[in-house]
Every structure is written in C-alpha cells, then in structure tokens.
C-alpha cells in the first residue's frame, strides 16, 4: 500500500477527509458509518447505567468503532501513515486513547485507579512494542500485545460482564488497526 499524497479538501468536507483519508470512497464512508452506528448502539444498549452515562459511553464507542474501521480501510491507513508523519504522532494518538479509557474506567468500573494504571501501562507497552517493531512484524506484535494485555488485566482486575467489550475494542483499534504500518502493495 502506498501512502496517500492527496490533501484534504478545504472547509467542512476537509474534516471528513482528515478522518476517513482524502482518498476514501463512498464505500469506505459507509463502512465507517455502519461501524459508528454499531458502536453507538453497543454503548447505549448493553451497559446498565443512568441515561447520561450510557449516552457518553455510546458516543465514545461510536467513535472507537468508527475509528477502528477507518484505520482498517485503505484510504484511512494511507492517511494515518502518510510520509510526512512521524512516529511521535502515532505515540501521541496512543496517549490520547487514555482519555476514553479513563472515562470508561471512571464511570463504569467504580473509579478503579489500579485498573486504570494497569490498563494505561498495557496500552503504553503494547503501543510502543508495535511502533518500535519492524513493519513486517507489527500486526503479529499488535495481536500479542492485545492478548497479553487482556489476559493480564483479566487476571489482576477481573472485569464485570457489562461493558467487557470496551477494552478489547480499544486495544484492537490501537494495536491492530491504527499503529501498524500499511502493508506493502
């Protein structure tokens, strides 16, 4: 896969280009939209909580699922890994994922700071392992990071059934979809 050379359009369409990638097709947009809708419903309908908290979770999960699909699409992957981007941008993205992680743990895991600390360490360690690994190995290392992180978190901080899908989705987005380099053509 070659990195994109297209630039986002000006104005409001450019915001969509920056999310989906400037070369995204209508099918790419449809896939991302369906994933976002699925995430919205997942967050809204599967966790017993007061309505404002479920709405926040629905928005977080919609973006999480849409972002996961964007990073799996050709145009999104090419945009994320375009030539003028540095590895620090990928690490910044990974660091920003601590925000939805912290919100989820704060609201739906009783403000468990030990779980939050462990989850952030797993996120940082797994993300660094993926980014610092040669591109040919990044997906395999990402899968190992995902499974090892989930195993360790479940072992030391057993998860409640409600919302047990959140951490695997977040880690899949970071370790398997966003951070690995594009596959060569």
Image (spheres, helix red, strand yellow):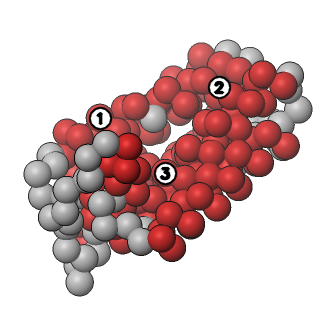
Q: Is residue 139 left or right of residue 82?
A: right
Pointer 3 or 2: first along the chain = 3
Residue located beneath label 1 in the image? 92
Point out the image quarter for the C terminus. Answer: bottom left
Left or right for 45, reference 184: right
Q: CA distance from mark 2 to mark 1?
A: 20 Å
Which is nearer the eye, 104 or 33?
33
Dot label at residue 181: none
Q: On the picture, is 130 further left or further right than 55?
A: left
Measure the C-alpha gap from mark 1 to mark 3: 15 Å
Q: Percent x, y for residue 70?
A: 45, 59
Does 55 appear above or below 128?
Answer: above
Residue at the spot 37% in from the left edge and 32% down from the top edge? 95
Query: Label 3 vs label 2: CA separation?
Result: 20 Å
**Toward the viewer: 11 or 177?**
11
The secondary element bearing badge 1 is classed as: helix
Farthest bottom residue in view: 185
Q: Nearer the viewer, residue 71 or 34?
A: 34
For label 2, the residue is 105
The quadrant where residue 127 appears: top left
């Amino acid at each position: 896969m070659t990195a994109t050379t297209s630039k986002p359009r000006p104005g409001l369409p450019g915001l969509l280009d920056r999310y989906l990638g400037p070369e995204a097709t209508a099918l790419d947009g449809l896939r991302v939209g369906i994933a976002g809708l699925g995430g919205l419903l997942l967050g809204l309908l599967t966790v017993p909580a007061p309505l404002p908290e479920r709405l926040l979770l629905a928005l977080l999960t919609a973006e999480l699922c849409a972002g996961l699909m964007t990073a799996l699409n050709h145009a999104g992957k090419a945009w994320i890994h375009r030539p003028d981007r540095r590895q620090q941008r990928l690490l910044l993205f990974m660091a920003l994922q601590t925000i939805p992680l912290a919100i989820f743990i704060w609201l739906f895991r009783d403000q468990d700071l030990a779980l939050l600390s462990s989850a952030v360490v797993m996120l940082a360690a797994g993300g660094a392992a993926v980014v610092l690994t040669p591109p040919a190995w990044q997906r395999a290392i990402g899968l190992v990071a995902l499974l090892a992180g989930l195993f360790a978190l479940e072992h030391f901080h057993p998860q409640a059934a409600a919302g047990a899908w959140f951490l695997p989705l977040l880690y899949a987005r970071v370790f398997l979809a966003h951070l690995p380099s594009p596959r060569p053509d």
